[in-house]
Image (cartoon, helix red, strand yellow):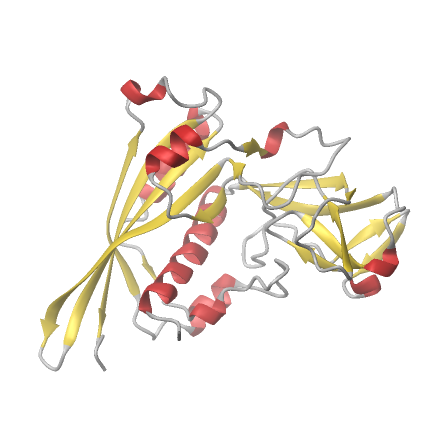
Amino acid sequence: MRPQFQHELTTSFMLWADNYICQRADAFSNFTTSFFADHNDSRLDENLIGYSSPHKQWVFDESIDGVIVPSGVWNDGEFLERGEFGLMFDFDNGRALFDKSFGYEKTRVSGAYSVKDFNFYITNQTEEQLIIESKFDVNSRFRQDFSGIAPYSQVAPAIFVNPEMSQNTPYAFGGQDKTKTEIRAVVMSQNSYQLDGALSVFADSKHEVFSKLGFDDYPLNEVGDAIGFNYRELSELSKSQEPLFLEDVRVSKLSDRITKKVDPSLFVGFIDFEISNVRYPRS
């Protein structure tokens, strides 16, 4: 199946929201840490090996002021650039990937990188499943001097994005429709300051306009690497293509009646986005 409008809207929204909170609220932290050999990743290609950091997800957007997007790592005092020993980065899982020839015996691999204050995930889980049933690791609580973070696990603080509804209504003669899409985001944070910050930033995004990008514009490849991604430049190039308008944004917090059932280390809020776009869906 070829990518459809909903695929492109979800891709565009995820990249915009990630850039928006990082840029507007400086919602990232810079770290320099050791990396640790990951022996237990059965999903990784047999020709690759991983060295994990204590954090995920790393920032890969070079347009955000002040971030560190790694170009290499240190190995026993020697700087290895991308490509040496096949070096790549898995930004989603916060690790460096090497060719198998690099070996697991290295004990002094380290690097500098930026970690998002809020990880982003697309989900189709219900709010009850996310809030009550799911268990999350927390980025800042890992013992950074002693262990890497396991790949693929979901890590809080995080924002879980769920496109809930899309509807076309006639807008103009010639088959032009107004497409309204509703997206609900569930925010999981470590404290009330962090939660209030995320809700405030996105509440102020009402009436923002952002670019509709192609499904193929999502920068992460099959191993989670991204090279030279700059959201600001990509967005400028795509401005003329059916811009997306945040017609309404509503924020709220989890009711006190439900709070007792939630992990006490998490503070939960909701953001409801209403996005409109004028298009020709049948052309």
Report if residue 211 is visible in the image: no
Quadrant of res 211: bottom left
**Residue beneath the point at 73% across and 44% down:** 40
Identified at 11% across, 70% down, the residue is: 171
- Residue at (42% x, 56% y) in the render: 16
**Quarter-wise, where is residue 172 in the image?**
bottom left
Q: Is residue 265 above or below residue 27?
A: above
Q: Residue at x 65, y 50 (%)?
A: 68
Relative side of 106 to 272, left or right: right
The x and y percentages for residue 150 are: 66, 40
Camera-nearest residue between 230 and 263? 263
Horizontal and vertical percent for residue 99? Answer: 81, 61
Position of 107 with respect to 217 (left or right) is: right
Q: How many marks?
A: 0
Residue 53, percent across and down?
A: 71, 42
Q: Nearer the viewer, residue 268 or 209?
A: 268
Image quarter where the N terminus lies is bottom left
Q: Work out whether residue 79 or residue 126 is closer to the camera in this orientation and state it.
A: 126
